[in-house]
Image (tube, rainbow, N blue to C red):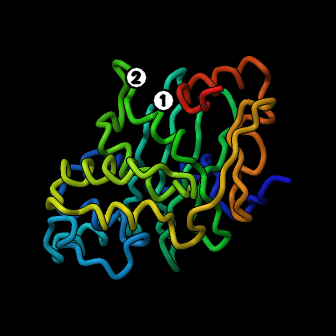
Amino acid sequence: MGHNCGMVMARHWYSSAPVVDGLPLLGEPGFWAAHLVDPCEGVSPEAFGVDAADAGAMLERLHDKSAWPVFEVPLEGGFSIVLHYNSGEEYTSTDCFLVRPGSSDAVLASTDQDRIGPGLCWPELAAILHAPDGAAGVTDSYARLLLLLPVLGDTGTPAEAVNVVAGALIAQGAPEGCAPLAQRLLGGHPMWGAQPWSFDREERSWLCDGEHSPRTVPLGDHLPRQQRAELEASLAGAEPDA
């Protein structure tokens, strides 16, 4: 049975919200320390190679009630993963959707009071690190990885993933020797943590065993066959070897 995603702000509601393109924020000091603050509770911003004041200022920008940043991670086949900051009157949450023009959006994760996640396993995230040629949005592979890390939660993440994440952190300004930080980030968002995943060969979809995950049912389960095939192709490389 799928997770009840009723509390999440549906993407069409964002059309009347004060949404702004978050892409320019990616190169600003303190962005990654602010974006990853929840999975890294208690970790000093200096671990990211930034000043605490810069991280605090960026956190204020991400939580600005008059300007809600949105980030689009383009995938193959016209699909994209869209991450919205939602700064309501009481608190800020992030909603993450799998989007394709002309079809319904799928909620991957949300940090609202309903807590929905994890929404990606490591093979899927690793498969989408490189953007399609000519795509617009978040195209840098390190930025794509770090932006979507909070959506990840996978007990089967391989040991080499620590080096991959550490390399991304270093490329964004973190000091050498940040493997412990990378390991911490791979542990999953505190709202849902790391969960077991398995690949259903009949459904050709990864399934998550986490009670808060929307991925307990096959991705694209309600799409027409052609659209579902396109969706599978957008995550090409995520299917395990036979």
Which residue lies at the image location 24% right of the left edge and 78% below the top edge?
44
Q: Residue at 66% across / 43% down in the picture?
A: 106
Q: Where residue 139 appears, x then y in whole percent?
A: 33, 33
Q: Secondary structure at mark 2?
A: loop
Please, is residue 44 above or below residue 6 in the view?
A: below
Q: How many marks?
A: 2
Look at the numbered disc 1 and give the secondary structure of its residue.
loop
| Residue 186 image position (x, y, % from top left) | 44, 60
Q: Nearer the viewer, residue 130 or 18?
A: 130
Measure the C-alpha gap from mark 1 to mark 2: 6 Å
Q: Is residue 48 above or below residue 96?
A: below
The residue drawn where x is 60% and y is 32% is: 240
Q: Considering only order in the chain, which callout, 2 or 1, is on the residue closer to the N terminus?
A: 1
Q: Which residue is mark 2?
A: 132
Residue of label 1: 75
Residue type indicated by callout 2: Pro
Left or right: residue 106 compared with residue 156 = right
